[in-house]
Amino acid sequence: MSRTQLVIAAAVLSLVALGGWAVFLSGQGLENADRWVTVVGFFVSTALAAGAVAAAWPASRSPGPARPATTDRVAGSGAAYAGEGGRANTGIEAGGDGRTAEVNRSGSATARGPGSVANTGISRMPRA
């Protein structure tokens, strides 16, 4: 059976069960129907709560996503000037490995001319 067919079958079964429950309760009278609903509601809510705990249990035991080992930090970097296709760096050039980054009080960066690169913060480079 496909997933869609299972969902349809579950919906039809639920509607039939609810219809049968309504027919049963309508023959019980108001006071007895109230008692039945209270007792059955208690067991249904207890079963659903237990199911939720059972479903959440494996997720609470997993280690979760890996955290970066360290944070790349730059603080108080000086000025960087690159000209005529040169490179200047007073910050960090690091691989793009998903590590966190923090920059405070970086210096000014000026790049003049084609191909010039100046960095006073963090520059992520693809790993080779």
Image (cartoon, rainbow, N blue to C red):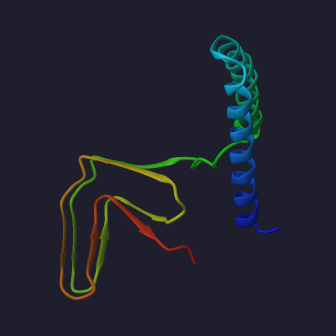
The number of numbered discs placed on residues in the rendered structure image is 0
- The image shows residue 81, relative to residue 44, as above or below, that is below
Question: Is residue 122 rendered to the left or right of residue 68?
Answer: left
Judge left or right: residue 65 versus residue 85. right
Residue 46: name its quadrant.
Answer: top right
Q: In the rendered view, would you say 122 is above or below 45?
A: below
Q: Quadrant of residue 29?
A: top right
For this rendering, which residue is in front, 124 or 6? Answer: 6
Residue that lies at the very extreme toward the right in this rendered image: 1
Indicate the quadrant containing the N terminus: top left, top right, bottom left or bottom right.
Answer: bottom right
Q: Decide: is 45 above or below 105.
A: above
Which quadrant would the C terminus be assigned to in this image?
bottom right
The residue located at (77%, 34%) in the rendering is 54
- Residue at 71 percent across and 58 percent down: it is 7
Give me the residue at 29% from left, 70% from top.
Answer: 88
Q: Is residue 51 left or right of residue 113?
A: right
The image shows residue 102, relative to residue 22, as above or below, that is: below
User: Residue 89 versus residue 10: which sits nearer the camera?
Assistant: 10
Is residue 3 or residue 127 the one in the foreground?
Answer: 3
- Which of the 4 image quarters holds residue 31? top right
Q: Position of residue 78 (x, y in %)?
A: 24, 55
- Residue 71's spot in the image, x, y percent? 48, 47
Foreground pick, 59 / 117 = 59
Q: Residue furthest bottom?
A: 114
Residue 107, percent from left and from top:
21, 55
